[in-house]
């Protein structure tokens, strides 16, 4: 996320005059750090934990159920973020799908919560710092974003691959450990 935001500073720069640190900025940063991880965790528990499983329960076969569960919860996640900008909507679809895959690959919500929290903390902290010393606002109207939003989808894809690789290694290490225990027991 740090690398992504450095790249974004060059691809889609904010006006330097927007950077101001005031009492409002300091308070916003404190609120962001204290509450945003909880908000992201609640979204992950709701969308990836509850809705994905609920929608998947409509289908008996496992693979189609998984596809339906992830697709519908991801679509609802993107729709509830209320943007009329197609690039931003695509980014919300990417975040929803990538965190759903992280939850699936990691066999739990930990990775998806961590990624979503990190994503939102970065977005809100940067929004606080580049708000002319005032409150955070995000323009979600058509034309507000652009192709640079594909960088977020790239970061999300990289995160999914990292979770997959970590889980693959953890599974391999676990199986190796069981084999060694069986050999030692014999």
Image: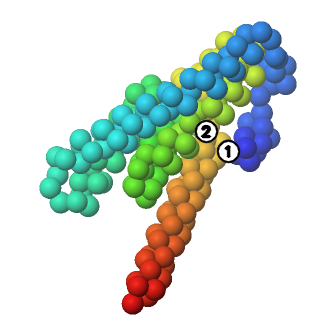
Callout in the foreground (1, 2):
2
- Which residue of the protein is positioned furthest toward the bottom in this rendering? 186
In-front residue for pair 186/73:
186
- Which residue of the protein is positioned furthest toward the front in this rendering? 185
Color encoding of the figure: rainbow
The percent coordinates of residue 105 (x first, y second) are 43, 58
Q: Is residue 29 above or below residue 40?
A: above
Residue 101 in view, yes or no: no
Q: Quadrant of the N terminus?
A: top right
Q: Is residue 107 above or below residue 24?
A: below
In the rendered image, which residue does mark 2 sit on? 118
In-front residue for pair 101/173:
173
Residue 144 in view, yes or no: yes
The percent coordinates of residue 96 (x first, y second) are 44, 42
Q: SS at mark 1?
A: loop
Q: Is residue 11 above or below residue 27?
A: below
User: Pointer 1 and pointer 2: residues touching (CB < 8 Å)?
Assistant: yes
- Residue in the image at 60% along x and 44% along y: 152
Q: CA distance from mark 1 to mark 2?
A: 8 Å
In which quarter of the view is residue 51 placed?
A: top left
N-term mark: 1 or 2: 1
Q: SS at mark 2?
A: helix
The percent coordinates of residue 146 (x first, y second) are 62, 37
In the rendered image, which residue does mark 1 sit on? 1
Please tell me the numbered disc located at residue 91: none
Residue 36 as seen in the image, left or right of residue 109: right
- Residue in the image at 39% along x and 31% along y: 79
In-front residue for pair 73/93:
73
**Disc 2 packing (10 Å; few <14; some 14–19; many ≥20):** some
- Residue in the image at 40% along x and 27% along y: 80
């Amino acid at each position: 996320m740090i690398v992504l935001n450095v790249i974004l500073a060059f691809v889609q720069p904010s006006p330097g005059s927007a950077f101001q640190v005031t009492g409002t900025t300091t308070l916003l940063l404190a609120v962001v750090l204290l509450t945003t991880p909880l908000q992201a965790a609640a979204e992950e528990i709701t969308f990836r934990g509850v809705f994905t499983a609920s929608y998947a329960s409509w289908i008996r076969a496992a693979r189609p159920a998984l596809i339906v569960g992830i697709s519908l919860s991801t679509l609802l996640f993107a729709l509830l973020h209320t943007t009329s900008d197609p690039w931003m909507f695509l980014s919300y679809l990417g975040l929803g799908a990538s965190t759903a895959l992280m939850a699936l690959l990691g066999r739990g919500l930990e990775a998806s919560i961590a990624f979503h929290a990190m994503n939102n903390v970065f977005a809100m902290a940067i929004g606080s710092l580049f708000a002319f010393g005032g409150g955070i606002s995000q323009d979600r109207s058509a034309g507000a974003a652009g192709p640079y939003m594909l960088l977020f989808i790239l970061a999300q894809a990289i995160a999914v691959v990292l979770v997959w690789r970590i889980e693959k290694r953890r599974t391999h290490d676990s199986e190796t450990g069981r084999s060694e225990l069986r050999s030692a027991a014999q």
